């Protein structure tokens, strides 16, 4: 059984890394206003069309020592990082949620497919905001629609909770956006807040905010102390911390909720 599990995890890691390779194209081309479907992958510096050996997830980057095969320009570490992150998230999803004992096969496969879809959405939002400071609206819409469909077909009893949580979550961040006139957070974070509340529901969305604000403050402090960020006049993207809080609650929500309840009691 262990061998089958390891092979399954390896398979989904490779699948995730391959999808992550496509997500790098989605992230870059969506910001450069380039078409996603048409046009072959090319070097950002010399525009040389890339061949199969240049496009192997993770492997090609290290095989080429992080440089373009043709112009020798240094390639961004974001590419293998996105591919590796997506692969790890896919493998972790399978390890955590498959199989789900005591449920029908339709529910199991529906849940796993939905979660894998969420992981791709999270990766795009995380790295788009980290690299470009933008949370792409079409990707958020894909996440919202996928979540609504999943709740309607598989979690009808939780639908109202998640809908109310999404609205309250959105209003909470919108109030910060309004009070700070967009200087504290961006409107993309407000849109993501709606999506996050819809995915997690109450009370996990509250814990997600706690994680996001705590990690965001911690990273900001580190950047200030290392003089890579000024106290005034510069900001860091908040979206990645919201995504981090969401993912942690998806995987460890029960443990985090139990810890929070014991702490406050």
Image: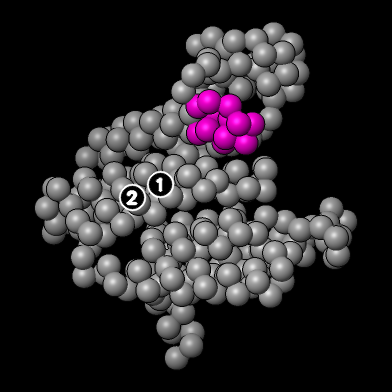
Magenta portion: prevailing SS class: helix
Q: Is residue 214 visible?
A: no
29 relative position to 12: left or right:
right
Q: Is residue 81 left or right of residue 154?
A: right
Snapshot quadrant of residue 229: bottom right
Q: Image check: 71 left or right of 118?
A: right
Give the residue at x 40% y 76%: 203
Q: Residues within 10 Å of mark 1 (few under 14, many from 20)?
A: some
Pinpoint residue 166: horizontal percent, then vertical percent: 42, 68
The residue depicted at 50 percent of the width and 11 percent of the height is: 52
Q: Do labels 2 and 1 touch, CB within 8 Å?
A: yes
Q: Residue at x 45, y 91 (%)?
A: 265
Q: Quadrant of residue 196?
A: bottom left
Image coords of residue 30 (percent x, y): 57, 35
Secondary structure, mark 2, is helix
* Residue holding disc 2: 146
Count of marks, rendered view = 2
Q: Is residue 265 above or below residue 2?
A: below
Question: Does residue 107 show up magenta in the picture?
Answer: no
Q: Is residue 47 visible?
A: yes
Question: SS at mark 1?
Answer: helix
Q: Dot 2: within a 10 Å radius of its alpha carbon, few (fewer than 14), some, or many (20 or more) residues?
A: some
Near-viewer residue (36 or 56): 36
Placement of the N terminus among the 4 image quadrants: top left
**Vertical relation: 4 (above or below) 59:** below
Residue 180 occupies quadrant: bottom right
Q: Please state the extent of the stretch shown in magenta in the rendering.
A: 23-36
Tell me the residue that label 1 is attached to: 142
Residue 68 position in % (x across, y down): 68, 15
């Amino acid at each position: 059984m262990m061998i089958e599990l390891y092979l399954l995890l390896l398979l989904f890691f490779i699948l995730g890394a391959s999808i992550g390779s496509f997500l790098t194209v989605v992230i870059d081309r969506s910001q450069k206003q380039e078409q996603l479907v048409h046009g072959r992958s090319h070097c950002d510096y010399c525009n040389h069309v890339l061949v199969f050996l240049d496009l192997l997830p993770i492997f090609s980057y290290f095989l080429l020592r992080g440089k373009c095969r043709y112009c020798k320009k240094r390639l961004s570490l974001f590419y293998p990082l996105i591919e590796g992150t997506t692969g790890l998230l896919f493998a972790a999803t399978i390890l955590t949620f498959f199989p789900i004992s005591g449920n029908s096969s339709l529910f199991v496969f529906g849940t796993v497919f939905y979660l894998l879809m969420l992981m791709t959405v999270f990766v795009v939002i995380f790295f788009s905001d980290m690299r470009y400071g933008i949370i792409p609206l079409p990707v958020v819409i894909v996440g919202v629609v996928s979540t609504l469909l999943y709740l309607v077909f598989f979690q009808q009893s939780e639908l109202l909770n998640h809908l109310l949580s999404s609205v309250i979550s959105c209003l909470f961040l919108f109030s910060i956006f309004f009070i700070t006139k967009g200087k504290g957070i961006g409107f993309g974070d407000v849109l993501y807040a709606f999506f996050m509340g819809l995915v997690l529901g109450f009370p996990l969305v509250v814990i997600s905010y706690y994680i996001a604000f705590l990690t965001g403050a911690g990273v900001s402090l580190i950047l200030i102390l290392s003089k890579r960020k000024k106290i005034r006049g510069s900001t860091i993207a908040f979206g990645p911390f919201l995504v981090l809080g969401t993912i942690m609650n998806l995987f460890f929500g029960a443990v985090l909720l139990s810890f929070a309840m014991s702490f406050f009691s």
